[in-house]
Amino acid sequence: MDYSRAAVLGVAIVVLVTAAVSGPLVPGVTLTTERSVAYGEGTANVSSATLPDRATLERGSFGQRGYYLTVPPGTVQFDALTGTPMLVYRLNIDDIGYTRSTVHFLDASVAERYEVTMDADNFAPERIDRQTYRGTIGVVVEDSRSRRLVAERNLTVEVSE
């Protein structure tokens, strides 16, 4: 047997043995480490939160039907942050039956000041029949201690043509 054939055969044997040992044939043996992150664990002490007082429903442009909801970001100021708590930025517009929440997953890389955002959303034109709507916007913290509302305010949703 020549040297190159022996090298190929040796590598093939190592691959097969590794696959057999780390696969289902030998339970409990793994060659990788599993990283488990449990979001909602840790603590988040919020010192203040600033939320917008207005959002806009703007008619689509360039021949697009419907309206697009744009919600400005809010800011949350932390006194302390440990682990991986979550922030939920939520909006309710009861008159059109609309609720939206965006979850922000936090970790040690978050600074003392954090900006919460919500993606734009669209509405069929027949759902919008007024120039303004009243809504409620808020921020909820979920951590090891509890799920709690840390800021909430009324907001005006202005419709622009």
Image (cartoon, rainbow, N blue to C red):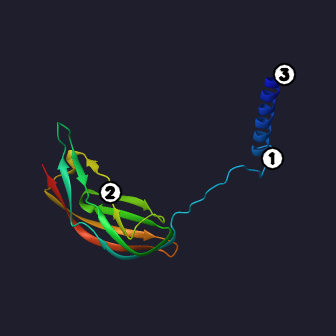
Residue type marked 1: Val
Mark 2 or mark 1, earlier in chain: 1
Residue depicted at 42% across the width and 70% down the height: 141
Q: Distance between the residues labelled 1 and 3?
A: 34 Å
Q: How far apart are marks 2 and 1 (CA)?
A: 47 Å
Residue type marked 3: Asp
Neighbours of disc 2 within 10 Å: few (<14), some (14-19), many (20+): many
Mark 1 or mark 3, earlier in chain: 3
Instruction: Write down the quadrant of residue 152 in the picture.
Output: bottom left
Q: Can you name the residue that lies furthest to the right here?
A: 1
Residue type marked 2: Met
Neighbours of disc 3 within 10 Å: few (<14), some (14-19), many (20+): few
Q: Which one is in front, 143 or 69?
A: 143
Dot 3 lies on which element? loop
Q: How far apart are marks 3 and 2 (CA)?
A: 65 Å
Residue depicted at 27% across the width and 62% down the height: 94
- The image shows residue 81 at horizontal and vertical percentages of 46, 72
Q: Name the residue under label 3.
A: 2
Q: In the rendered view, tell whether residue 69 sits above or below residue 11.
A: below
Q: In the rendered view, tell whether residue 35 sits above or below residue 79.
A: above
Q: Mark 2 points at which residue?
A: 118
